[in-house]
Every structure is written in C-alpha cells, then in structure tokens.
Amino acid sequence: GYHDGFVGWSQTGNQLYLLGLLDEPHLPFDCDTMRLFEEAYEDLGDSQAIQIQTYRKVAPMKNHGRDIYTSTLRYYRNAFTDADKQMAINVFLGVFVPKEGEANMKNPLLQQYLSFDEIYKTNELTDFDRLLSTSVVRTGDNVVSLDSEGGAIQAPVVPRWLLKEDSVLCGLLLEMSSIYQPLERKYHSTVQVGDYLYMWGGDQPGLPNNKKKKSVCSVMEVCHLPTGEWVQKPTTGDPPLGVSSYAAAVIRNEIFFFGGDCNHDDCYHNSLYSFNVDTFNWKELSPTTSHHGPLMKADSRMVALQIKDEDYLAVIGGVGSSSNNTPRQPGAQYSKVADYQYCNEVHMYRLKTGEWTSPTVTGDRPPPISHFTLTSMTNTTAIMFGGYFGDRRWSNVVYIFEFTDTSVKCRKFPNSGGPVPWPKERCAHSSVLINCSSGPHLLVVGGFGKTTTNDCWLLKINKMEWKELTYIPDSVTDRQGHSLSVWNETQTTHWTIEFGGKRRGGSTISGTRFIEIITSAGDLVVHSLLDINEYQKRRIQDAIGKWMEEGSVDLTVTRVNMLGAPGAGKTCSQLLLLNEDPPTNDTSTPIACPAVRAMRVAVCDKTIWNRVTRANLLDQLATDLDAVSQEKKTKEPPLPVVLSLPDNTQPATEIRPDPSPTSQKKPDPADSSETKIIKENKEYHTEAVVQEILATQPKGIHKSDHWLYVIDSGGQPAYQELLPLFTRAASLNIITLDLSKPLNERFDLMYRIDGQYFPCHSKSTQLAFFQSAVSTGASFKPLDISCISKKPTHSMYLVLGTHYDKVSDATLKEKEEILKSSMSSLESYLQNCVIHQSDDDSIIFPVNAIAASEERAKYSEEICKAIWFDGSDASLEIKIPIRWFAFELSLPEQSIVSVKEALSIGERYGMNEEDTKQALRYFHDVSLMLYYPEVTNVVFIDSKPILEILSQLLALTYIDDRNARALILIKPVSRAVTINLKEGFFNIEIFEHLRSKCVVFSLPEFQLCDLIRLLLHLNIITEVQKGHYFIPYALPSYNEPVSIKETNAKPLFIVWREEKSEEILKSEQILPVPTGLFPLTIVHLLNQKECITKVSPSTPGYFKFRDAMSLRITFKGKEDTLHLINHLLLDKKPLKSDLLRLFKSSAAHYMIIGTALDLEVDDLLPYPAATTSNLIQVFKRWIDSNKRVTWRKLLQVCDDFPEELGRVKVDVEQFLSSDRARENYQE
C-alpha cells in the first residue's frame, strides 16, 4: 500500500542519515533516490496485485493521487479512528489498565504518532478527519483542502501539529493529492503538443541558485488536456540553464527553448535546446556564447516557421545585461536603460544546418523591446502585441511579420486613437491565436502597464478590430508573467489554458484556469470559465455524455435455469459454477431466486465464470469510462488560417464598443455567476451511481463479451410449472441429479422453511425431473428488442451429477446408462439438445459441489467450457448501450419502483421514454425483473416479493404441519379456507394472512388490487365470481390410471409444434407440451367469454388436478364436459426394452408389424428361429426412422390387425396405465 511506501520512505531517510549519506534524517521527495524508491515500491505493488488478480496496467500519464489518497484514508481510519478496536488492543496488551474513577483511555499509538498530548483537549482530530475526507491539492509548500465539489474550504483545517518537519503524515499530505497541480511560478511557458500541455521551469519561489537547481529543473510538468490531469515527469539529459523568461516554440514532437536567465544576478543565455516529448530527453543545439548568435538575453520571443519545406526558428527582441559584449546584429538597434540592454534583433535558426542567420528586415521594424507576445499565425507569419521599452514605457502596437528564408517584412498597426476600442499599453501579458470560420483572432489576457491592465481582449486580425471581453474575472486577468495556451478540441470549441504568473500585489500564483471559447454565428464567444476542479468534472461529464450516448458492448447472454429435485444441490451447483465457496447454511429456494449475473473472464489462462456484483460492475464501468476519458479522439482537421490584412496606412474602422462598462469591477466566479454561458449543456446523471463509478479504482476486471443470468429455481412441481412465467427466453437448463441416490426411486418431496423440513404428501423421482426438464422445454414469447442481433434457437441442457465424492465409478457408469436409456425415448432433436462431455460422450458432468477451492476451480472451468462451446444455441446476442448498465445500477435497491421513477432515472442518462422502456423490456427478458406496463405502473426490480407470496400461498395447499404454517402465516386461517384452497379456490382476504404481504405491498403504487390484476394478466389465476378466484397450480398432481366416466367421450389431440421449423415439419415431429402450459390452458379456457366454462365438481369420474382437469362448458345452451389430461403417454417415444418385452409373444408377426409401420422388411430372413431377432430389427429401424415413433402409432397398428395383435394391445394399454410407465415416461 501507499502508506507502507511512506513508512518505508521515512525509515530509508533515517538509515541514509545514520550512514552519513544525508545531512538530515529526511529523504527529499524530489531526488533521484526517491524516484528509484517509488519505482521499486510500485513494482512490488504490481507484483502483489498480479497474485491476487487485481492488476491493471496504469498508463504512464495516469495520476496516482487518488490511489494514494484512498490508501492513506483507509490506513488512517483503520489505525486511528476505530476506537473500540484500539482500546481492546490496548487493554489486551496491558498498555492501558482501567481503574475505577478514572476517565477512558487515550490512544497511545495516536499519541506516539502525533507527539502532541493536548490534541485530546482541543479536538483537532475532527479537523484531521475532515482533512482526510477532502481532496488535498499540493501547490508548492502549501496544502489546500477542497470539499467534495472542488471548492476551497475557507477555514484552515490542517492542525499545526501536522506540519512538523519530522511527521511522516506531514510529508504524505504534502505529496499526495487527488488533484495534483504544479508549483506556483511566473515567467515560464506552456506548450501544447497534441492532447498534452508541457510546462518547464519559470521563476519559482525558493528556486535554488546552486547545484540543486539542475535537479529541480530536470522535471517536466505535463497536463493531459482531455482530462485536465497534471503529472510531473522526470527528464533525461541536461536541461537549459535559462530557467526563467526563456522563449519557447514547438515543431512536431520537439519543443525548443531559447535564452532566458538563471534566476540569479544578471546571468543571461543565448543557448538553444530541444526537448523531445516522446523520449523526455534534453539536447543542446547551440550553447551559450558571447562570440556569435543572438544577444544573451531574456524575455525575447520565438516562433516556429516552415519555409520551402524546411524548419526554422525565429527569435525577436529581448533584454540582456548592459555589460553583454555579444557581437551586434547588423541593422538591429540596442537601447541601454540602467543596467539592462534592450534590442530588436531578428535571428533565424535553420534546423537543417544548425546555424544562426540574420535575415534582411524591411518595413516597420519595432524598436528595441521585451516582454511582448509573438504568436504564430501561419507557417511564415506571426503577430506581435505589446511589450516594454524600458524606462517605464510600454507598447500597445500590433506588428505583423512575414518571413522568407532570408528576409522578414514588418507591418505596423498602431492605435489610431479616438473611439475605436484598443487595449492599453502593457507587457508581460499572454496571448494565443484562435482560428474560426470568420478568420484568425488574437486573445490577449492581463499584463502590466502604466495603468491597470487586468482585462481580456480579442483581436479580429483580418479587420484589425479589437473587442474587450468583459465579465472575465480578475482571478484570470490580474496576472503578469503567466502562460497561455490554446487547445482546439474541435473546429468550434477552443480551450484556453492559463497557468501561474503573479498578481499586481506581487504574490506568485498557482492553479490552472480553463477558458472555453466557442464559435457562435461566426463569432467567438466565451462559453465557460472553469478552475481545474470544475474542468475535470466537466471533462468527466463530457466523457460520460459520450460514453452514455455512443458507448455500447456486444454481449452474448445466456440464461441459466438451475433445475432439479429438492435437495439435489442446485444452490451448491450454482456457487460451483461461479467458482464460489459452498453455502454455510441450509436454505430453501422458493419458486425462483433473483437472477445472478456472471461474466466470462480469463484468469491465469483459465476460463471461468465470475459473479457480477454491483461493486465489480462499477469497477468494469469505471475501467470503460477511464478508457473513454483517456482516449485520443479522431479530430477534425484544423481550419486553415486565412489572412486578409487591412491596409495599415488607413485608420481602423470604428466599432461600437461593448455595451458593458469596461470600468466596472468584474465579478469572480466565487462571488458571482455572471460568466457568460450560451446554453445549458445536457446534464448527465453525476450523482449516486456515476459518482461511484468515478470514485471506483479499476481493479483489472477484463471486459467480457459473454454474460450469464443464473436463476436458481425451486424443486417443487408446482414451482416448476410457474417458472416459465418468470423465465421468458430459451435458456440453458442445468439439471442437478444427486448421484448418491437412486434415479428411479420414488421419494417424498420436502418443503424447507427457515431450515426446517416438512413433508408435502407428494412423491417423485430424480429421473422424472430429468425427463420432464428435457422433454418439455419452456414456453417463451419471442424477444421483442430492437438491438438483438441473434435470437436463441432452442433450450439446451447440461446434467450435473452432484455428490460425486460419495459414489464409485461403477455407480456413475450405471446411472449414465439409465439416463441414456431414458433419453432414447426422446425425439432425436431433443437428444441433441443435451450437452455431452467431449472426451467420452457421457452426458453426466460429475462434480463435488462442496469441494475445496482447487478442486472447485477445476469443476468450474470444465462447466464453463461446456457452456461456452456447446450451449450457444440457447444464447442471444445483443448490442447493449452502456447507458442501460448505468441505468440499471441507478435503480433503487428496493424491490419495487414506480414506472414514473424509472423513467425519471432514465432521463438522467439522456434516455427518452421509449429508450428507457426498451431497457426495462431487456432486463425483463433476460433477468427476473418484472415489467408489465399494460397492467401495473410499477417495476419489480427484484421479483422475490411476488415469488415469495405465491410460494407461501401454494405451500398452504400441500403442507399440513402446524409449525410450518406458523412460519408462513401472521394470523391463522379457518379450516374452510384451507379446504377451498386445496380445491384451487381462494378469496383476496387470504393474502392478508401471509407474512410476505408486508414486503410485496410496501409501496402505495402496488397494493392487493394490483397484485390480483397482475396474476390475472399472467393467467396464474382466474376470477370465478366477484372477489373469488381459482388457481390450478394449487391442485395436486394426478397419479391414478386414466378412467373417463362418459362412454361417448371423443379424444381431442392437441399438438405443440415449433413454427417455421422446416426440419420438424418435414419429419412430422411434434414438440411435447411445454412445462407450465397446461395450467395456463385451463385458466385461458375459464376466461373465455363466448361460452360459460366452470370447473367440474370434485366427484368420481371427473378430474380436478394440476395436470388433469374436467371443465363443464355451456355453449349455445348445450352443456358438455371437457376432460383435459396432460400426462397421457400415447405420444411418448417407446423404449426398445419395453417394445421387446410387450411384443415378444407376437414376434412371429414381425412382417405385419414392419409393413404397418412403413418399414422395409423383405431382407429379413424368414426362419422360425429368427423371429425374435427380426422383431428387434423392425423396432430398431422404426426408432431410427423417426417417423411417428409413439405408443399411439403402435396401438393404431394393433387396431388394424386385431386378430394378430389384439392381445398385445391389451398388454400395452395396461402397461401405459401402470406406475412403471409413468416413472419411465413421466412428463
């Protein structure tokens, strides 16, 4: 951690002091040893991060201040503010022995650190805690605290004891920052290269005049303009000695520095250095010398030129020592004022040859001058404004210079006087060129003159028209010796960056100001004025805007339903799938648990699924946002500078002055909000979640393109039939089977409530669960989302055999054979939907769901690969706008929100109403979020409340234990109510008795009437009379042989067929009835208005079960009974073993059977001894043909040949009515 690093830094300083290598026990922050020390600790941290899989490579320009701040804050709070923990430690160690009558203990550790006993009396810990809860900005030797909004805290909050020289925390707070800014300085330059601003040197307080100056000057301050983040970078090579008042210009990736002074005595230079922004290396091009070249001077200005495809530098003017004896330039003038010598030299440096030349100067050459601005306009032109002649004389004249490789032409544009606006004489100001569609403009800010010059002016160069920009505050304009640069973000948006300088009163300034100037109707207008905190927030806001509006991620989404008998290990298997620890307690799963998000990640060359929590999803979004804010944009080409200068012999055109009085005191943004703004930008949501995203430090979660939504469903049969109502898309069904228990042994279903087990008076088998899951599938409505690129084809199935540690390989093989035999009764296309292992083609993936970590990781990886490679048919591909993720994160953590509130949250991300509804539909389809705008004005973010109240309602129908009912009911219900519910009938008052009602009805927007309306819409219930309802899911399953009372009953064969599936249509394959469809059909028929439909009475000969129902239908005055039975086995695919056993006595008729089944039988040998083998061949060919391979077809053959096969028909019908048949072919 960073706190470890600073403790190490402190100890290293003491060690070097004891060794005699330092004069004091303190290692300076700005030395080479400290930089090596930091790099070593950073490498150590990276290595540790890799080991715990949280490593993310930080870009070289990235500021680590926030990391430092967070780590220090954590360390401080853990070490000093956890009073109870510290007191307990002190008592345990015997440091404090409590005595009766004495006050509570002090914190000895804190006392030792602070060495200030009176702190407990002055309560300065409050200030310290406040300090550490704010941002700390280092500006030189000062510490400025900023609140969460970036504003300065006016009251001093740094305790005096904290600033002791030997305090580790003192050095820490001075060095750490969440917003780093360079030291204050003046008479420096900032140079823009690409998206970065480079600043070096300048007159800084305390700048040494000895050998330490080289170390101080061997750093470059770099500002990343798209984010506004400053960092300090070390340089290599020897920097120039002219650290202050130098001239600077840039050519591509090299910045050139000329002249300057040494910041002591009258030491001036005429050296020329280059600095490479790629290598951060200094190179001397021309040394300081008095024998040739320009005068050794400061405050000259330099521009870069490109003439005939060659690069040149032009240096003009400046001031040096009067004792300087550098050879005079022919044609130049020199003016001695006191101990200084001013000049109007014009030198050109040819980079190709490395030589200084003196061009021929024509036109209106300026007089000897310094402290002016010289701004490049084109490759061969530059503009000069202002300057100082010495002897308290200033200039406000504009000069235009036009260069060739051997000459320079000067044109003068003075103030003609009169009412024409014109800036006052000044020097030490700054200027930049801003180009727009109406031509080039010169922006001039601040300076020093005979009168006040804290103002801002804009010159339209082609017309030589000045305009004062009023309402620019003094905090921007009251500066001299400051730097000004422009970053043209687009052709219409120009950021002017101001740094440093000094006030008129003499104080040197730190801090960065950003002036946004935009093109509006062909004119330049100040749009906003921001300090560095506001700018960074604005840049992040812009990044969020771009991120929200344009960002998207291509996702492959797979819904995973965990299915299986109660107690088969569904929950443990889910945790195994996610490579998480097994549960420590025994919990019951209701109808379904809320969906768990997971994403496919690569860790140590292995592919696994990791749960996506809110925290690490924030982490991923923070990584994405960081990438967006750091990326280099594809910029528009800059507008060409078109010069069309007026005739400088004519007076300038009179311009109406700005109506704002120039003498008016300009307000500072801290005191006023009158900075001119053209329009409000769209304000994206920067509270709550987005602030969390921005505060989250990315921990290396890699962006994934494959997500799982895992739904752990309950094992009760009624729950399985309700599940399709809450899982609305094709899915990957993971079926868990307990290998330690027989697959075909009937067992009592148990219901778990708060860890207690209660019998349900119902039996089933694991094999029945497997067959039901694989053979029926899930009904689902096609997804209606515009951004889906690939819809799921069909459901897939993966079988997990749990408790593998309790069985032998022989037992595993036996159960594998049982499953494969059971699968042989399925249609071939259903068999292909079961995922097989790649090595031995087995269908069971044996696992120990409670295995230790290393073994769990192996199982998890194996399952992940199976899902990834073989489960794609159950996946959908969708392009998700990034704003949908942020929208989901912003939804309240409560279970239910109103649609109105959801739409309001969507608006914060620039989402219109339809966009928000699309997002809600997406989460409705892939998770367990419930969104039914046609019937209710709420969204169930977590469907658990509604699932729980249904679970408790249904549990009353099959649990008679009083202890169980006490866990479900808040007040008892009468016996009559319970009997009616077991018949499927209830009234709305029953919900008032359930414990979960206080949760589902927690909001006024969703009350009991809304729940009833939703259940009616989902066809879960139907209203039989006013206030009384019928729910078929509450009925028991039908387990008796089929026996219909009416003798004239006619069968109605209802089939389920997949639309638009040519393969299925050609082969005449019929899909099984999907799970949950039968109760829906009953409710649908009861809701018909064209006829009167009633549930038949519970009398013999009629059915009232969850899967068998008799309905009395009155249509046009005539009443009939409709018997609906969902568990007939006639349309099941027969097993070969059952066929041979039942038809073996009629093997002699194999020719009749084969011909009736439309099979080729002529090739079979007609020997009496071969009849049984021939019969086996007939049935094998029939099953392989996949042509109506059902018990119904066989009974039809028996009916067609009653004399030969009549006896077999009786045997088949008896078998299909037996428990054995229901176990083998149960739906």
Image (cartoon, helix red, strand yellow):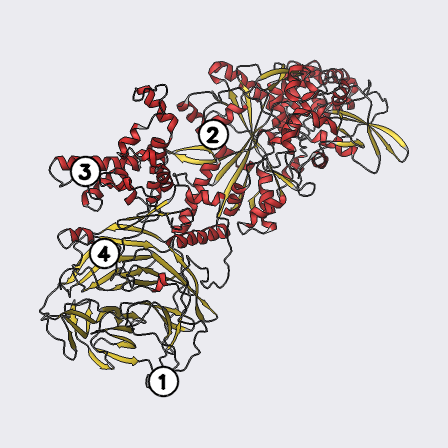
Q: Secondary structure at mark 1?
A: loop
Q: SS at mark 3?
A: helix
Are dots 2 and 1 in contact, CB under 8 Å?
no
| Residue hosting label 2 | 578
CA distance for labels 4 and 2:
57 Å
Q: CA distance from mark 4 to mark 3?
A: 26 Å
Per the image, the residue denoted by label 4 is 204
Could you say whether the residue bearing mark 4 is in a helix, strand or loop?
loop
- If you read the primary sequence from the N terminus, does the residue marked by circle 1 or circle 4 appear first? 4
Q: CA distance from mark 1 to mark 4?
A: 43 Å
Q: Which residue is mark 1?
A: 651
Toward the viewer: 578 or 1009? Answer: 1009
Residue contact between numbered discs 3 and 2, judged by CB atoms under 8 Å: no
Above or below for 262 versus 574: below
Q: Amino acid at mark 1?
A: Pro
Say which residue appears at 35% left-offset and 86% top-offset.
650
Which comes sooner in the sequence, label 4 or label 3?
3
Residue 960, quarter of picture: top right
- Disc assigned to residue 311: none
Give the residue at mark 3. 13
Q: Residues within 10 Å of mark 1 (few under 14, many from 20)?
A: some
Spot occupied by residue 910 in the image (x, y as percentages of width and height): 54, 52
Q: Nearer the viewer, mark 3 or mark 2?
A: 3
Q: Is residue 824 visible?
A: no
Contact between labelled residues 3 and 1, with CB atoms less than 8 Å apart: no
> Relative to 825, does residue 187 appear above or below in the rendering?
below
Label 4 close to label 3 by CB (< 8 Å): no
